[in-house]
Image (cartoon, coloured by chain):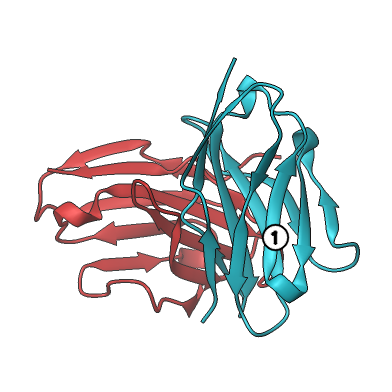
Amino acid sequence: EAGVAQSPRYKIIEKRQSVAFWCNPISGHATLYWYQQILGQGPKLLIQFQNNGVVDDSQLPKDRFSAERLKGVDSTLKIQPAKLEDSAVYLCASSPERGSGGYTFGSGTRLTVV
Amino acid sequence: AQSVSQHNHHVILSEAASLELGCNYSYGGTVNLFWYVQYPGQHLQLLLKYFSGDPLVKGIKGFEAEFIKSKFSFNLRKPSVQWSDTAEYFCAVRGYNKLIFGAGTRLAVHP
């Protein structure tokens, strides 16, 4: 079974620039999650999708972050404009259905904002 | 809102020593509990999980965890660690259909 694919693996941008991350979940997984992991901290949930609808985005800084999941498969997370404090690893995870314990994580995208 | 607290941020052990990593959670309803491991440069991997039943859960690579409901705890244990267990360990709690992580414990095992 293929895992959760994320790209790019690394990204360095200047503050105030924009950036986008891509995630391809495991085939058939209805639920997709984006987490932000700042160095020295545990992953923090940013947004949760069920198919192509948003279930929870309470922790997403909506003034600069946006995410979409077209056709209930791939997802993109965008930051515009980026701030220094956005430097983190952005993790995508998927699970077969909402509430399932079977979360599978991707390798993440390490973002550095300079 | 649920929260997770991991007591130790850094643990250093010698090979063959026993390991116990503390995890306490705060949540009023039924919870599912998880331990994840992140080896250097790799993605998060599930070590073990508790949904219901026997509170002593066995996971991969010789790890186990015990759910103590009265103490809101889910501590991770391994009787004898190896150098290859050097990694970061995260406790996580799922409630309200949200998976919330602790801050993590960085374990270094010296040969």
> At x 79% / y 35%, what residue is drawn?
B62
Give whichever of B73, A43 is nearer the camera: B73
Q: Is residue A13 left or right of residue B100?
A: left
Q: Which chain, by letter, is cyan? A: B
Amino acid beneath label 1: Phe
In the picture, which quadrant includes the C terminus of chain A?
top left
Q: Is residue A98 visible?
A: yes
Residue A27: x and y in percent read 65, 52
Decide: is B105 above or below B67: above
> At x 77% / y 63%, what residue is drawn?
B67
Residue A62: x and y in percent read 27, 75
> At x 34% / y 46%, what residue is drawn?
A39
Residue under circle 1?
B74
Give whichever of A71, A53 is nearer the camera: A53
In the picture, which quadrant includes the N terminus of chain A?
top right
Residue B98: x and y in percent read 57, 72
Q: Which chain, by letter, is red? A: A
